Image (cartoon, rainbow, N blue to C red):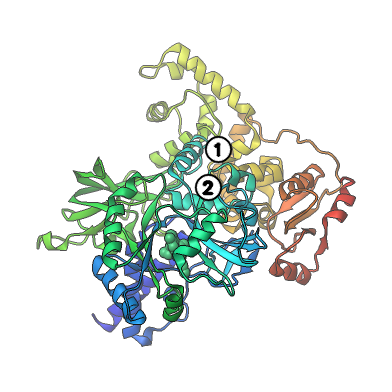
Amino acid sequence: MSEQAIKDRIAFLREVIDRENHRYYVLNDPEIDDREYDRLISELKKLEDEHPEFYDPASPTLRVGSDITASFEQRRHRYPMLSLSNTYNTEELLEFDARCRRESGTEPQYVCELKFDGTAISLTYEKGILTQALTRGDGTVGDDVTANVRTIRSIPLKLHGDGYPDFFEMRGEIIMPHASFDRLNREREEIGEQPFANPRNAAAGTLKQQSSQVVAGRGLDSYLYYIVGDGLDFTSHFDAMTRCREWGFKVSEHMRRFNSIEEVIEYINHWDTERKRLPYDTDGMVIKVDDIALQRRMGFTAKAPKWAVAYKFKAERAATRLLSIDYQVGRTGAVTPVANLEPVRLAGTTVKRASLHNADQIAILDIRLGDTVYVEKGGEIIPKVVGVELSSRGSESRPLVYIDRCPVCGTPLVRPEGEARHYCPNSDGCRPQQVGKIIHFVSRGAMDIDGLGEEIIEMLYDEDLIRDYADLYDLTRSQIASLDRMGERSADNIVNAVERSKQTPLGKLLFALGIRFVGATTAVKIADAFGSVDALAAASYDELMAVDEVGDKIAESITAFFASPHNRYLIERLRKAGVRMTAEKREVVSDALAGKTIVISGTFSRHSREEYKAMIEAHGGKNGSSISKNTSWVLAGDNMGPAKLKKAEQLGIEIIDEERFLEIIGGE
Ligand code: IVH
């Protein structure tokens, strides 16, 4: 490779990895699997090592990602939360065994556990009481999700028996079992929210919910697998976990102790097939040295213990030919490439189509038409193309040229900075976008217009009877009845349902409008905060940011939506048709807090956070999500984070406690 080619490759890898870190840690929506991610990181590391001239302090190889969310208090881990090095085959396990034997001088015993595919948690117990639960964060600082974790039934709030250390931390995984996951996704689809891609994302997303009531209803579970603390006197990991089980922790019944690596490998092979029968996801096994004195001697690298490794199961994969690529255009204009494959059996089903994600993914894997490709069903529901068999590629093969125009309307595609996907910008004139927006508008959770299925909307569109959702309110009974297979009765029902939808609550209307990034829950919060479409349209960026759950991405999107003349025109037509544009009157107790934006921080003793939020609104105030110059007061409980305290002090914002707050609203 030329110097320039190396430089370009390094820049490309850094960009792809950065974006993936963000998808994984912030959006909880990773696009590439762990193995591919590891491969990219190691390729980048290797290039950087060989070419120190391209050193960059911001390279993703020099930091670990973080799952920190602004709205949780951040706290430092007393002991860093490390990860594990991965192995993918028997040879690598034998190398691990050789290192352990060299260090111990004998045949060490190993504990073999399932590798739970969830989200890591650190639980602090003081005198047998759960006092704190932190997410992994960046390994040094994590989010305080104690209130949410307390709702998980398998986590003991108070330990059983006796003999436990006065102070220690229990580490483990929060998981979402398949049954809870399936139920949650069904519910989300019903109300028009994006389903979670897999149980891991669902568990991580749930733990970061603002409302612990929501968390409590989602059926999370836990497995604990590691204890840390000062002066613990265990000599064996297996014995320690057995004691932890007695104190009430959920320690897996599949944990085993073995005398040799061969037995470990046999156990791993057993679980490679058996795991498919488990009611939750595992993505591998973890092998730990049992003897804690030996663990101490072996120590840690900066990122992981040297006395433990993960073994990652191979996802089930199949080889087949890539016949062609379809480019699908969604409601937002996002283009998704989908592979059409020669049908192949994979994990019990026949696969004909698989996701190709985006242009970068195609370029990274150098996927070409006619290639023999590997498809995998990982944790995701949709199978994906994960690699190419280069040896069976013919000499006439040419790199794939990604489309640069919309496959439907021909408009040149755009790719916003920092995004992996291409978009068709012709949002008001491109069929799948227009039809998609109307389908979204009528869906359950939005305007909920019964009887208007996707097929009917497509027919109405193709008959030129509708172009946008405002057109629905001009449809006549005879127009609908003129469609194929449509009777007078069904036409009547539709007209009536359209009529009824005019009374839809404001939150649902805002969701129905299809403002990017505004989901059903956020829409309700926005409706509560502004009370009408007009107030929202007139809101400044700062006023938008002051709303709970609204960050800069959503604030910008709302501003852009109302800046569009086409959108304003649609709203005027909805208004003329009689669609309600204001919130129903909320129960207002007083206006003691009128004009005040209040940010809640910490934990309270007299009422829950949720109750305080409701009180703020009932007394005419607004709930703010983060401290800014628009904040009037901070309502602070115990354990307010030091960062928040500092910010409030810097901005000169008054901090009030719950007693004072209750005094102001005249309640108790
Ligand atoms: S031990 C210092 N045991 O996998 C000990 N981790 O890929 C560190 N995990 O960060 C962890 N099952 O979140 C351990 N039985 C198990 C595990 C496990 C899942 C997770 C954990 C870790 C990650 C590393």
Residue 196 higher or lower than 82, as above or below:
above
Q: Residue furthest bottom?
A: 53
Q: Amino acid at mark 2?
A: Leu
Give me the residue at 34% from left, 44% from top: 277
- Tell me where residue 152 appears, x and y as whole percent: 58, 48
Q: How many marks?
A: 2
Residue 12 higher or lower than 253, as above or below:
below
Q: Amino acid at mark 1?
A: Ala
Report whether 348 appears left or right of 305: left
Give me the residue at 68% from left, 52% from top: 547
Residue 512, label in figure = 1
Give me the residue at 43% from left, 36% from top: 435
Q: Quadrant of the N terminus?
A: bottom left
In the image, 115 versus 213, the foreground residue is 115
Evaluate if marks 1 and 2 touch, with contact meaning CB atoms under 8 Å apart. Answer: no
**Ligand 1 quarter of the rendering:** bottom left
In the image, 521 versus 534, the foreground residue is 521
Number of residues whose C-alpha sits closer than 10 Å to that of mark 2, classed few (under 14), some (14–19) or many (20 or more): many
- Tell me where residue 614 appears, x and y as whole percent: 75, 44
What residue would you read off at disc 2? 220
> To which quarter of the image does residue 641 belong?
bottom right
Q: Residue furthest top?
A: 488
- Tell me where residue 324 appears, x and y as whole percent: 21, 48
* Nearer-N-terminus badge (1/2): 2
Q: Rounded to the nearest whole Å, what is the CA distance between mark 1 and mark 2?
A: 30 Å
- Which SS class for mark 1? helix
